[in-house]
Image (cartoon, grey):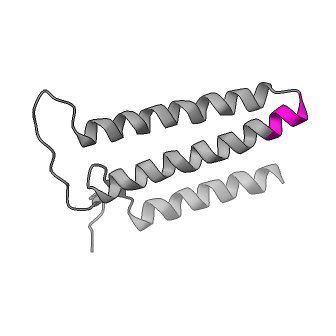
Amino acid sequence: MQTQGQTQKISNPQTEVPTTPQVNDRDYIDMCLNNTKKLVDTYAIALNECSNDNWYNTLFKIFQETSQAQRRVYNLMFRKGWYSIDAEPAQKIQQTVQKESQKKQQIQ
């Protein structure tokens, strides 16, 4: 059980990579993740600007595939222990849910 204000890390054991000037597996995967994130952002902008339905549908399929690839790369990095997640305390999650529920009620 965690105490108030204390965050818990969710992570996997870290896969070790050489700490040399040469590019290693983590570096390559990190570059891949950054590039796929940029592609997803760029496709999202293109979709917002697209006026032709056929072109939009084609771009949307590419966007989905790229977004799924980005997620797979992130999951790989998480499995390798190169990313961790901070678990939010249940109280903070409940406060956010209440706040967003109030906003929803105001706009209905």
Q: Classify residue 108 as left or right of residue 30.
A: right
The quarter of the picture where the C terminus appears is bottom right
* Residue 62 position within the rendered picture, expressed as x and y whole percent measured from the top left: 68, 40
Q: Judge whether 107 appears above or below 36 on screen.
A: below
- The part of the chain drawn in magenta is 52-57
Tell me how many marks there are. Answer: 0
The picture quadrant where one finds residue 21 is top left
* Residue 34 position within the rendered picture, expressed as x and y whole percent measured from the top left: 43, 33
Choose between 90 and 78: the one closer to the eye: 78
The picture quadrant where one finds residue 2 is bottom left
* Residue 59 position within the rendered picture, expressed as x and y whole percent measured from the top left: 74, 36
* Residue 56 position within the rendered picture, expressed as x and y whole percent measured from the top left: 81, 35
Q: Judge whether 59 appears above or below 76 on screen.
A: above
Residue visible at 16% across and 29% down? 22
Q: Main secondary structure of the magenta part?
A: helix
The picture quadrant where one finds residue 89 is bottom left
Residue visible at 41% across and 55% down? 75
Q: Classify residue 91 as left or right of residue 61.
A: left
Q: Residue furthest bottom?
A: 1
Q: Classify residue 64 as left or right of residue 7.
A: right
Residue visible at 34% across and 41% down? 29
In the rendered structure, does residue 12 fall within the stretch colored magenta? Answer: no
Q: Judge whether 73 appears above or below 105 on screen.
A: above
Q: Judge whether 67 appears above or below 7 on screen.
A: above
The quarter of the picture where the N terminus appears is bottom left
In the rendered structure, does residue 54 fall within the stretch colored magenta? Answer: yes
Q: Classify residue 61 as left or right of residue 12.
A: right
Residue visible at 74% across and 41% down? 60
